[in-house]
């Protein structure tokens, strides 16, 4: 597998050489942009599951995530206030969440990740959005989820994402991945954290942490971080650039909703 990856990089380098040699002086700017794009494709993917991903700029999943980020900003203020004066904190949800973070901070390395995965899994009762809210695919922020004590897979993932951040994991090492469960025929979402150069999956369906390369029967669709949402490509790095650009602008509305309608 390593040789195959290196072969892809070599092929990209050869293609770059051809572009540089035959490009005309009048199109130097366009060629430079094309070369930069190909150089990016020649490198190893930085995202979980070893696939390339491209940012999306519209669609329902991005709208939902931006709404969660706005609520997270408000909840972080509330959590900071409660953390500074727990005796006068009026939010049981905040106290429960802070207790998980505090216990995790007392552990090091992978044990910290395992503590958050286990504690959040036990703190939330699995329940569909339809049963809770009477509608499909509602994304809740951690304190709302902890107040209700129930949620579906993306609610677990969002709570873990924030707990990991508060426990000291850098934001650049945190992701939420939306996937298609090919066995159950439904959508699923998990928190993912980069640890010692490996992406580890924190799943509400299991207490054990798994590395992304060990996960089977899932097709990653979208990867989410603090800055936004990206769409995965399950095709080779040297796939046609115009096709990939067009695919990146596909509206996630519809297919994503169908995938994420049932998360448990």
Image: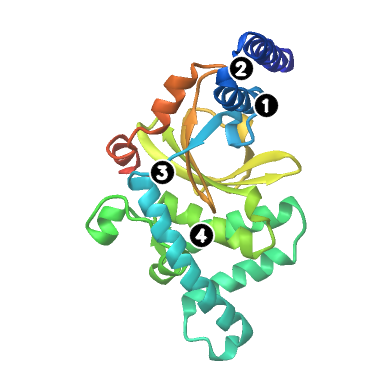
Question: Which label belongs to residue 43?
Answer: 1
Q: Is residue 159 visible?
A: yes
Outermost residue to the front: 26
Upstream in sequence: badge 1 or badge 2? 2
- Residue designated by label 2: 25
Residues marked 2 and 4 touching at CB (< 8 Å): no
201 or 38: nearer the viewer: 38
Measure the alpha-carbon separation of dots 1 and 2: 27 Å
- Residue designated by label 4: 159
Badge 1: residue crowd in 10 Å (few <14, some 14–19, many ≥20): some
Residue 182 rendering spot, x and y as whole percentages:
41, 28
Upstream in sequence: badge 3 or badge 2? 2
Badge 4: residue crowd in 10 Å (few <14, some 14–19, many ≥20): many
Measure the alpha-carbon separation of dots 1 and 4: 32 Å
Measure the alpha-carbon separation of dots 3 and 2: 33 Å
Residue 23 higher or lower than 254, as above or below: above
Residue 86 rendering spot, x and y as whole percentages:
59, 85
Upstream in sequence: badge 1 or badge 4? 1
Per the image, label 1 sits on a secondary structure element best described as loop
């Amino acid at each position: 597998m390593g040789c195959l990856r290196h072969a892809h990089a070599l092929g990209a380098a050869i293609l770059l050489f051809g572009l540089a040699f035959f490009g005309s002086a009048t199109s130097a700017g366009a060629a430079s942009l094309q070369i930069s794009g190909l150089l990016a494709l020649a490198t190893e993917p930085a995202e979980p599951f070893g696939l390339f991903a491209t940012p999306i700029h519209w669609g329902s999943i991005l709208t939902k995530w931006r709404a969660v980020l706005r609520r997270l900003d408000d909840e972080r203020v509330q959590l900071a206030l409660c953390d500074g004066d727990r005796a006068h904190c009026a939010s049981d949800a905040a106290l429960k969440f802070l207790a998980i973070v505090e216990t995790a901070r007392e552990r090091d390395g992978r044990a910290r990740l395992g503590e958050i995965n286990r504690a959040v899994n036990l703190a939330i009762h699995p329940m569909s959005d339809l049963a809770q809210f009477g509608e499909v695919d509602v994304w809740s922020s951690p304190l709302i989820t902890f107040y209700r004590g129930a949620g579906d897979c993306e609610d677990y993932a969002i709570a873990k994402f924030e707990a990991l951040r508060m426990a000291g994991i850098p934001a650049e090492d945190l992701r939420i991945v939306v996937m298609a469960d090919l066995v159950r025929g439904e959508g699923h979402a998990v928190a993912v954290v980069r640890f010692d150069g490996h992406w580890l999956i924190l799943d509400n369906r299991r207490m054990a942490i798994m590395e992304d390369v060990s996960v089977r029967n899932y097709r990653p669709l979208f990867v989410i971080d603090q800055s936004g949402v990206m769409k995965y490509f399950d095709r080779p790095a040297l796939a046609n650039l115009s096709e990939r650009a067009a695919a990146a602008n596909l509206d996630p509305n519809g297919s994503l909703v169908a995938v994420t309608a049932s998360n448990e």
